[in-house]
Image (cartoon, grey):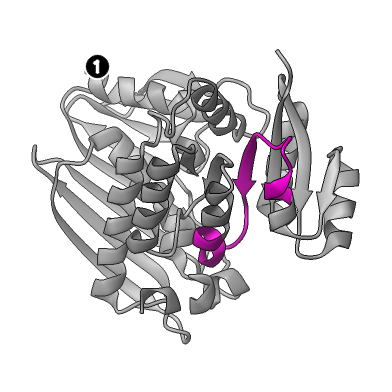
C-alpha cells in the first residue's frame, strides 16, 4: 500500500511536532506544508523532509496528492481554514480547540456530513492507547467504587499572544482547559447533572485561571483546575473506596500508579513507546478515511459538539467573549 500523503496548514510549534510525527511514522508521507509566508514553508519543508511547500493554504488544499490536512493555525482561524479544506473535498484533522464556539463547530460538522468529507478533532489524548488502559482501571474495580477525580494543568503562558488576545480566542480554557475536561469525560462519561466554576480574568478579558467541578448522575465528582499563570503538577488523581490512581500527566499520560487505601503502591502501568503521541490521531484518521467514514469513534462529532457547547456555557457564565461570538 502506498504511503498516505499528509499536508500541514501552519508552520508553528505544534506543526513542528506533527512534522516530527509524520516523518517517523510508517506508511505515512510528510508531503506538503503551507504558510502565509512562502519562505517559512520552504524552510519548514526542507527541515522536516516535506516534498511540497506552499505560500498559501488554498494552494495546499488544491493539491490533488494531499489525502489528509492537519490544521495547526490558532483557534480563531480553525473554522475558516477547515471550511475551505472540506469545501475542496479534503479530509481534515483539526487541532483543538475545535473552533471558537459551538456555532462554528455545528456548521463545520454539517458541511462534513453534506460533503461526506472526513473531519475530526485533534485532541490527542482521546486517541492514545493508554487512555483505554486508564478507563479499564476505572471500570474493572481495581480501586473499588470510583467516586472522585481531580485533574490539573498549568503553564506560565499568560503573556503569550495566543493566550492574551480575544481575537485569537485566547484564555486558559480553550488552550489547555480542554485537557482536564476531556480527561474527566473519557473516564467518568457525560451524564453530568451540574457544573459549578470560578474564573480569574486578565486585563484583556480572557480567562487565565479557572476551577470547574462536574457532578455526575451516579454521585461521582470531577474537580478540574487550569491556569495560564503558573506551572503545576499536571496530574490526574482517580479515587475509589479501595485505593486511588495517580496519573503523571493528563496532557500526555506516561504512567499510572495504583495505591491501596493505606497509600502503598500496588501496581504501576506505563504508556507504550511513542514517537510524539500524535501518531495515534493520525493513524485513526487514515483508518477512517480508508474505510469511507467521516468521523472516528475516538472523538465522534457528537462528542466534539458536547465539549464545544460546554466551553460556550462556561465562557458565557464568566463573561468571556470572542469577536466570533457576535
Indicate left or right for 200 with 20 as reference: left
The residue pinned by badge 1 equals 140
Q: Is residue 309 above or below residue 26?
A: below
- Left or right: 266 with respect to 81? left
Residue 72 shown in magenta: yes
Rendered location of residue 178, percent (x, y): 41, 52
**Can residue 248 be seen from the camera position used here?**
no
Q: Secondary structure at mark 1?
A: loop
Q: Residue at x 26, y 51 (%)?
A: 223
User: Is residue 132 in view?
Assistant: yes
Looking at this rendering, what residue extends furthest in the top direction?
A: 1
Along the line of sight, which residue is nearer the eye, 214 or 168?
168
Q: Name above or below for residue 31 compared with residue 168.
A: above
| Residue drawn at x 36%, y 46% as measured from the top left | 304
Residue 22, position as x, y percentages in the image:
72, 33
Residue at x 28% of width, y 49% of height: 306
- Over which residues does the magenta segment extend? 60-80
**Residue at left 31%, top 50%?**
305
Question: Which of the 4 quarters of the picture holds residue 237?
Answer: top left
Total numbered labels: 1
Amino acid at each position: 500500500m502506498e504511503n498516505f500523503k499528509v499536508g500541514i496548514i501552519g508552520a508553528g510549534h505544534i506543526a513542528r511536532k506533527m512534522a516530527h510525527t509524520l516523518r517517523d511514522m510508517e506508511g505515512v508521507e510528510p508531503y506538503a506544508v503551507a504558510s502565509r509566508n512562502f519562505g517559512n514553508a520552504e524552510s519548514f519543508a526542507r527541515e522536516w523532509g516535506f516534498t511540497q511547500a506552499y505560500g498559501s493554504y488554498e494552494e495546499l488544499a488544491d493539491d490533488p496528492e494531499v489525502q489528509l490536512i492537519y490544521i495547526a493555525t490558532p483557534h480563531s482561524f480553525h473554522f475558516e481554514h477547515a471550511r475551505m479544506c472540506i469545501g475542496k473535498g479534503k479530509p481534515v484533522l483539526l487541532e483543538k480547540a475545535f473552533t471558537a464556539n459551538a456555532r462554528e463547530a455545528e456548521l463545520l460538522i454539517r458541511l462534513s456530513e453534506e460533503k461526506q468529507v472526513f473531519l475530526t478533532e485533534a485532541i490527542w489524548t482521546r486517541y492514545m492507547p493508554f487512555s483505554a488502559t486508564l478507563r479499564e482501571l476505572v471500570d474493572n474495580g481495581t480501586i473499588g467504587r470510583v467516586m472522585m477525580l481531580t485533574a490539573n494543568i498549568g503553564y506560565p503562558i499568560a503573556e503569550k499572544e495566543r493566550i492574551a488576545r480575544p481575537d485569537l480566542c485566547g484564555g486558559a480554557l480553550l488552550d489547555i482547559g480542554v485537557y482536564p475536561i476531556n480527561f474527566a469525560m473519557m473516564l467518568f462519561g457525560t451524564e453530568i447533572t451540574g457544573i459549578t466554576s470560578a474564573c480569574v480574568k486578565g486585563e484583556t478579558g480572557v480567562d487565565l485561571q479557572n476551577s470547574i467541578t462536574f457532578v455526575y448522575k451516579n454521585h461521582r465528582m470531577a474537580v478540574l483546575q487550569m491556569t495560564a499563570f503558573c506551572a503545576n503538577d499536571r496530574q490526574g488523581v482517580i479515587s475509589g473506596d479501595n485505593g486511588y490512581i495517580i496519573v503523571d500527566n493528563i496532557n500526555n499520560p506516561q504512567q499510572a500508579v495504583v495505591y491501596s487505601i493505606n497509600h502503598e503502591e500496588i501496581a504501576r502501568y506505563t504508556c507504550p513507546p511513542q514517537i510524539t503521541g500524535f501518531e495515534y490521531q493520525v493513524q485513526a484518521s487514515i483508518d477512517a478515511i480508508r474505510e469511507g467514514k467521516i468521523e472516528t469513534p475516538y472523538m465522534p462529532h457528537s462528542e466534539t459538539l458536547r465539549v464545544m457547547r460546554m466551553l460556550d456555557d462556561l465562557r458565557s457564565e464568566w463573561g468571556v467573549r470572542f469577536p466570533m461570538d457576535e
